[in-house]
Image (cartoon, helix red, strand yellow):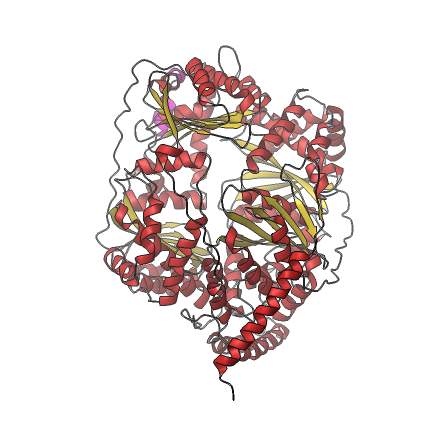
Amino acid sequence: MKSKSAFFVKTLLVLTFFLSSVITAFSQKQYKFESVPGDPLNTRIYTLDNGLKVYMTVYKDAPNIQTYIATRAGSKHDPEDATGLAHYFEHMMFKGTDLFGTVDFAKEGPIIAQIDSMFEEYRKINPSETDKREKMYKQIDSLSTVASQYAIPSEYDKLIGAIGGSGTNAYTSLEQTVYVNEIPANQLENWLTIESSRFSHPVLRIFHTELETIYEEKNMTLSRDDVKVYFGLLKELFKKHAYGTHTVIGTTEHLKSPSMKRIREQFKKYYVPNNLAICLSGDLDPEKTIALIDKYFGWLQKGDVPKYTFEKEEPITKPFSLDIFGPDAEWITLAYRLNGGANSPNADLLTIFDMILSNRMAGLIDLNLNQSQKVLKASSSPECMEDYCIETFEGKPKEGQTLDQVKDLILGQIELVKKGEFPDWLIGAIIEDLKLKQIKDFESNNNRARVYVETFTTSIPWDKYVNRFDRLSKITKEDIVKFANENFNNNYLAVYKKVGKNEIEKIKKPKITKIKINRDDKSEFLKQIEANKVIPIEPVFLDYKKDINSFTVSNNVNVNYLKNSENQTFDLYYVFDMGSANDRKLPFAIEYFKYLGTSKYTPDQIKQEFFKIGCSYNVNIGLDRVYVTINGLSDNFEKAVDLFEQLLNDPLANADALKNLVSDKLKEREDAKKNQQRIFSAMVMYGIYGPKSPATNLLSAKELNALTAQELVDKIKNLEKYEHHILFYGSPDPDQFKNVINKYHKTPATLTPIPTATVFPEIAASKNIVYAVDFDMKQDQILMLAQGSTFDPQLEPVIRLYNEYFGGSMNAIVFQELRESRALCYSAMSFYRNLLNKKESHFYNISFIMTQADKANEAMTAFLELLNTMPNSPKSFELAKSSIISTMRSERITKSDILFDYEDAKKLGIDYDIRKNIFDKVPSLTFDDINKFQQTTVKGKPQVILVLGDTHTKEFKIFNKYGKVKKLTLEDVFGY
């Protein structure tokens, strides 16, 4: 009898010979591809024999490849009686296959089949028979616990980590489900090996804990006013089409009765090669890449994909309305439904129509409503799906203004378009702006690959996309006027978002037993992927002195210059090391600046002039820095600088604009008190600094009303007199750049020193304390802060490894324990970070979890256990190390990011690329190193616990266990 090892060796030799033959066959095969003349991406589109579409563009900005795998399967394709399947299956695609995610599928598979059958029985039980359903669910939970002893949760994420991938994600929308990764260029074949398995034999393991995650996500969307408005809008506009009759996550009723069987049926129906597209952009060889894709995906069998058919919607003949209630400040949304989708002539016309109204700079809404301060804020936005387009308008009211008044103002702008009352030059400028946006978008592999996804899933032929500017340039003013009069009349829906009780039906939490993690197990598949050696990519780190050209202009103002050799665009920054901490009036002066004109130009004309030349400007201020940004087409670099310098040096005071701005600012402050994320952000500042924080360092209402237009104008005029430096990334060469800056950027011989900044001491907690703010929501948003040390470059490798291992990814300890094993939350993470990225500021161990209120106690207990006793998983630890190294090998900092990376380094007091230290030292680190770090820096440290949620529930009382509870008012956290 032969030994097992001898048998294995012989089998491996046979397999190697077979694969070698296969590779040779594929390498000899000739692949035809489609291309389009004039395509800026030089796209190759292949169609395999089984119908699989492959889109490729080569872009060697870094040795990486951005990957998207898209399927034409979204919520519109869900069965009428089982909505949410596409989204649910998206989650399940991360659970593994028969080859990975399991230690023994031969034993696990039959148990999963039993669970599958039990869910079908569960679905048949009437929801009113709660006892019977609970009994059956208990049996499902029990059997799932048995199955979990064979499962390896998140092994997909381990596989992607093992090959140095990053950005792992997925999303489901109305008509697409898309899977995302960025991978090192040398790992393409390993990635294809992984995805081939995933897209051929997915296994619905750990199903019921993931169902609880879906419940969490559903409850989150039911609590968000913007999401309720969007899906309410679709429901009203589409009475027959699935855009309105389905929701992406699914109805509460359908989620309560899940079906593994129906999900498998959806997979077999829609996850066939002739309904898929692999979209790639990056450092790749197209001919070798298509041969590999054919090798790993060419064997999949083509399927009969059902064509989505729909009954045409009845015309909307008069305005109608919908009221949505929730805690956010009120706003109004107007929505129009247009026949024809993304591939129709209406889509082109809608693009131009929308930008005539709102283009950030010179649209009718931009100038007549926002610039003129007639509303707090207004905008428009088109969305073209495959079957229909919609155009939405959003408006937020000023103090004392009604939503109907905002509605009438927006409708008035539409009427101007219908009458042709917009500048003749505007359409041409819009097309140039769209071209500029495309140039900037295509500097990113992510954007390049994503455009393939959008055209594929909305059935836009690639040649039509490439030639869109030719079509758009033929659109005339008369075409737009006709289009507007035909489509924008009394055929709109008005959604009134009002402040009121957030009435939602929460999905009840089922009882779930903690499943086994098997954290240190590896499938044979993962072992093989790790054993597949590739030619390593050598890392590239920055050398700021060599990479950046430094010189001075205008009375010794320092410049850091980078040449843009890729395209004819530029980005110019004036950087002032001062902000709101140096002058509380300065933020308001900068906000006031955008409403001002000069002695030569009105405020409207300034915006129009910038838009005409394909350029824009912006001024941003933070706690300790002001950024003046000018960017656009290099041909108009001098014009843009000249125009901006005129505005900066010759602003005309406008008392009416100031009065309006003060009123609007006070309204915005009140609105912020109704916004979940604005409140939580202010709470974080309170947790770090206490009541005197950067968030509360504001001018009072009395101080705002005492401001004069002239004192704010003086602050603007004096800005360039302060010490500052310049960053530039653009195609003009250094001499051209110097000539322009020296000509227009006039500074005094001696620059004024930066004013002394207010210091905000960071308060270290001496014991646990809970700060809570009441908010109408069904979840608790919880953040725990434990103050650490200040920046120490020697600790950076340990910190990077600690974050990767413990809490920074889906494969990390925190996510595995809290979501995968116990289904206690939708999201959970923990990391050690310097929030302000400054040498003198403290690091904090930041632990975040968002969970239903009835799970908060269990979630907090589990989280604190992890923070105090970090599990030791040798294999996970080694994977974390290899993931960091693999990712850093192909990571590149390029373009203007080099300039800002240097800016960040200087704030930390270093003049070198810290990544090299991390790369050199991580391989030699041991678990003892990060365990010691965790024990001395995290374990037992006093926590500032921030809780945003409904403080009136009985569940909220549990927080008394974790520290003294102090309920904060909105005035406490905002300072007004």
Outermost residue, bottom side? 1
State the residue at coordinates (49%, 10%).
599
| Screen quadrant of the C terminus | top left
Closest to the observer: 160 or 507?
160
Closest to the observer: 154 or 21?
21
Membership of 701 in magenta stretch: yes
Residue 47 lies, in percent from the top left, at: 71, 53
Q: Is residue 118 above or below residue 818?
A: below
- Residue 667 left/right relative to 281: left
Closest to the observer: 113 or 797?
797
Q: Is there any visible trace of residue 201 in the rendered image?
A: no
Residue 418 lies, in percent from the top left, at: 72, 27
Q: State which quadrant residue 274 falls in.
A: bottom right
Residue 701 lies, in percent from the top left, at: 37, 29
Membership of 856 in magenta stretch: no
Closest to the observer: 197 or 832?
197
